Image (cartoon, coloured by chain):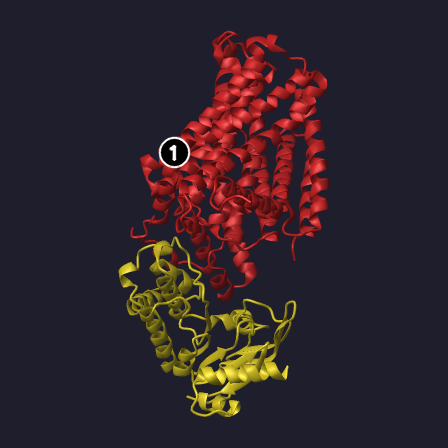
Amino acid sequence: MSTPASWLWLARHEARLAIRDLRHLMTAGGRWRIRNVAISFALLAVGLHLLAFGIVAPHAEMTLEAGTRGFTSITGTLLLTFFLLLSQSLEHVTRLFYGRGDLDLFRSSPAPLRRLFAIRVLAIAVSSILMSLVVALPAVNMLALLGGLRWFAALGVAVATALAAAGIALVLAALLFDTLGPRRTRFAAQVASAIIGSAFIIGVQAVAILSIGTLSPRDFFDSDLVLSYMPPPDNALWIPARAVLGSVPDLALTIVSAASVLIVPMVILSGRLGGYAIATASVSHGGSRPVWGARLFRTASPRQLLQRKEWMLLVRDPWLASQSLMQLLYLIPAGLLLWRFYGDSRGALLVLAPVLTMAAGQLGGGLAWLAVSGEDAPDLIATAPISPTYNLTAKVEAVLIAVFAVFAPFLIGVFMHSWLMALVIAGAIFLAAASSTLIQIWFRSQAKRRYFRRRQTSSRIATFAEAFSSVAWASAAALAMNESWYAVAPTIIAMLVLTATWSIRPR
Amino acid sequence: MNMVQSVSALRVASLRKVFQRPAVDGLDLRVGQGEFYALLGPNGAGKTTTLRMIAGLMQPDAGEVSIFGIDALANPIAAKRITAWVSDEPMIYDKLSPTEYLAFVAGLWGMDPTLAEKKSAALLDWLELKPHAHERCEDFSKGMRQKVALAGALVHEPKLIILDEPLTGLDARAARLVKDALLARVREGCTVIMTTHILEVAERMAERIGVISRGRLIAEGTLEELRKQSGSSNTSLEDVFLTLVAEQETTQ
């Protein structure tokens, strides 16, 4: 038995909560599901290994002699992973300060807050490591199988990447807090997290489009243009890449450096984290700022009222608006592509159709969740003299109008080039957004709007169905743009996904 | 006002709802026009389920609900047009101001905008929300939120107001304002049906009281009539209530 409030005691407490959360997430509370979850994981593992085989097999023979070209490719992949982990860790660290949960209990107890926060930062690092390993393991297994056991060193680099991401996230969160204060840090951290998560890949794609005219990061890293700017193979920049390829000294250096990136700020900052949490408890939302939107409701039909209400709530909640619209960052490369090749390359424009369709499906799903499940006053709407169908229709219209408002500039741009292409893309956007909206209606589950980020964990089926239908409509759009009758196949798949989702919807 | 008129404000017949066990089990209820009716019962007695079915928030398994002669199950829109619902947990929009919220509610009930504006201003003034009329509700206390929700229920001038524990969590001043607002409406001819665990409130405000246990109405009447039914005189409503519930549980 460990002493109450000791390091070990707190770590056990956190671990117990984390394991129970994870178990609940996987089984939704049902014992009988554990077997199903195990089978699903086994199938997923097989699928990921097959996918990894297809991607990494050509590189299995790469050695420390790979040179700048090989090191650039590996470092690019590591950077992509690092930024994704940093994005997630920054969100988790920020949540430490703002989540109330059991924090008030700890704050009112004699247990040292510094210790609690240090344990919680370590827990974030552990979850980041696990995520990193889950992503890396199939690829590393396949590489080890085809190219030798030396590839397992890459798992050490995956751990180091996660440690460094957690440490830098802690420093960034503290900087944001000290600079912006408790009221603005949450929003700023959410935006920063989304930008960090997407910036690297978007940046690479943008530079790739502007320099060599391709969306593919792999082609970009392989290009002579990039390689001409890279340092020689013995440069310190390539230490992590050499560690991935099995160099033990480089691996040790990478892990030690990454661990210091986490531990040093943790020791320095953990005493201040409790203070941050206390500061967030007394944050005001700034409600004293007068708002004057009542006139928008005065001359509207109930349908317009419901729609305007949805838009007003979204516009007035910068955090929610940013979460919904952040996915649109991925449209920046598409916009660049449109601008770069406008009028002189039909082929490049074809790439736009699936990108826009996919984004419309995801945006539509997010907005539909807010409108349908994230209704803050469900009793008011349910007791109003309007039928449920009328209410639902109004909300669906609100979602679709918002989606088309976002994509209108792209559609106008394509329309100036070819009205037929614009029509195909508009149709695909409508179908993808409408499909995601339908899925959200079928799987609606009342929740506070602030739980928007957790919507994807509340129903895995809805999340996967949304993703699959968006991918299917995106494929159909791409093929239809090529005037291929094969577009019928993904259309049928999309319809099948919708039918299957409808048939297993909760009743 | 203690009379049940020919067309009742609310008539519930053989109402039934079963979850794992019957929550409401063949309930019959009649509330007259302009009456203040309090529905009491121990935790899990079926009070909230009953009110949610009356308000159209939940579909009964069996039974009838009639509001001012309108079959609320067959014609819910017409029934909702003259009904308002207030729950113990005020559900309002954090990002709207009280003025905007009331304009939205008035629009949903199809009120004339000019009239709605006047009513909103008067209600906000009466409920002491005027200084906060244009602030977003997100920083409001529980009491202020409940007052906004109550204003929303009153703004469209309902004939029947259904309230589920509306005084939970309110301080004395806010509770007094809410009670005064409800009594004023009743004086104007509005009908109120309310559940509460604060028996003094029921004792002072309600003209008739219904006691519900295990989904059934076990006693009903004025305080005096309830005293007679429980076989005790000159006792408080709390004593009467505890006696009636204990008798019912012993019988079962």
Q: Chain letter of disc 1?
A: A
What is the x, y in percent for residue A442? 62, 52
Above or below residue B31? Residue A177 is above
Of all chains in the rendering, the one displayed in red is A
Above or below residue A77? Residue A410 is below
Direction left: furthest residue: B131
What is the x, y in percent for residue A191? 42, 36
Q: Pick whichever, A9 or B5, lies toward us.
A: A9
The color chain B is rendered in: yellow
Above or below residue B81? Residue A457 is above
Instruction: Name the residue rendered at 48%, 91% in the picture.
Output: B232
Left or right placement of residue A175 versus residue A248 in this view: left
Q: Which residue is mark 1?
A: A269
| Residue A171 visible from this viewpoint | no
The amino acid sitting under disc 1 is Leu
What is the x, y in percent for residue A72? 54, 14
Q: Pick whichever, A303 or B69, lies toward us.
A: B69
Left or right placement of residue A21 versus residue B150 in this view: right
Residue B63 quadrant: bottom right
Left or right placement of residue B134 versus residue B106 in this view: left
Instruction: Name the residue rendered at 63%, 50% in the picture.
Output: A28
